[in-house]
Image (spheres, rainbow, N blue to C red):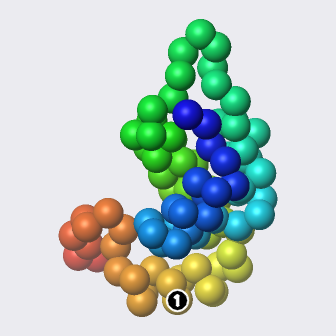
Amino acid sequence: MIATRRLIRELREKARMRIDRDLEALILERLGTEPYPHTYTEQDLFEQIRKLVMCYGRTQEEALPEEVAKWYTKREGPKGGEAQQPQR
């Protein structure tokens, strides 16, 4: 099994993943062919795409202006469910 435009479209719709055109191109480049002599399972593809989406999202946040990034962190709270440490 390989990553296709159809698979990416399904992930956008069903898994609600935010995948833009640049990320789609990266996914197709990396996962669009089988790693001979091995094959990808559906779970392999989903997990690798999930990791790419997470890393891509992090780099996009870092590219945001500092003021906007502060606003997002205030609105969304700490990432990964971590408790905020009190400031001293």
Image: 68 above or below 55: below
Indicate the position of residue 84 as horizontal and vertical percent values: 26, 72
Q: Is residue 43 left or right of residue 33?
A: left
46 left or right of 56 in image: left
Numbered-mark total? 1
Point 59% across, 10% down: residue = 37
Say if 76 sits above or below 58 in the image.
Answer: below
> Mark 1 sits on what residue?
71
> Residue 56 location in percent, x, y?
62, 56
Q: Would you place residue 44 above or below residue 39 in this image?
A: below
The one nearer the camera, 8 or 6, is 6
Mark 1, Cα crowd under 10 Å, few <14 / some 14-19 / many 20+, is: few
**Residue 45 shows up from this direction:** yes
Residue at image x 44%, y 66%?
15
Q: Nearer the viewer, residue 7 or 85?
A: 7
Q: Depth check: give the residue in front, 56 or 85.
A: 56
Which x, y percent locates residue 11? 52, 62
- The residue located at (45%, 69%) in the rendering is 14
Q: Please state which of residues 33 and 83 is positioned toward the viewer in this rendering.
A: 33
Kindly identify the amino acid type of the residue bearing the numbered disc 1.
Trp
Task: From the viewer's perspective, tell me whether residue 9 is left or right of residue 88.
Answer: right
Q: Which residue is found at the position 58% from the left and 79% from the top? A: 69
For mark 1, give the secondary structure.
Answer: helix
Name, please, the residue furthest toward the top: 37
Q: Where 69 falls versus 44 (above or below)? A: below
In terms of image quadrants, where is residue 9?
bottom right
Residue 61 at what x, y percent from top left? 61, 69
Residue 85 visible (yes or no): no
Placement of the N terminus among the 4 image quadrants: top right
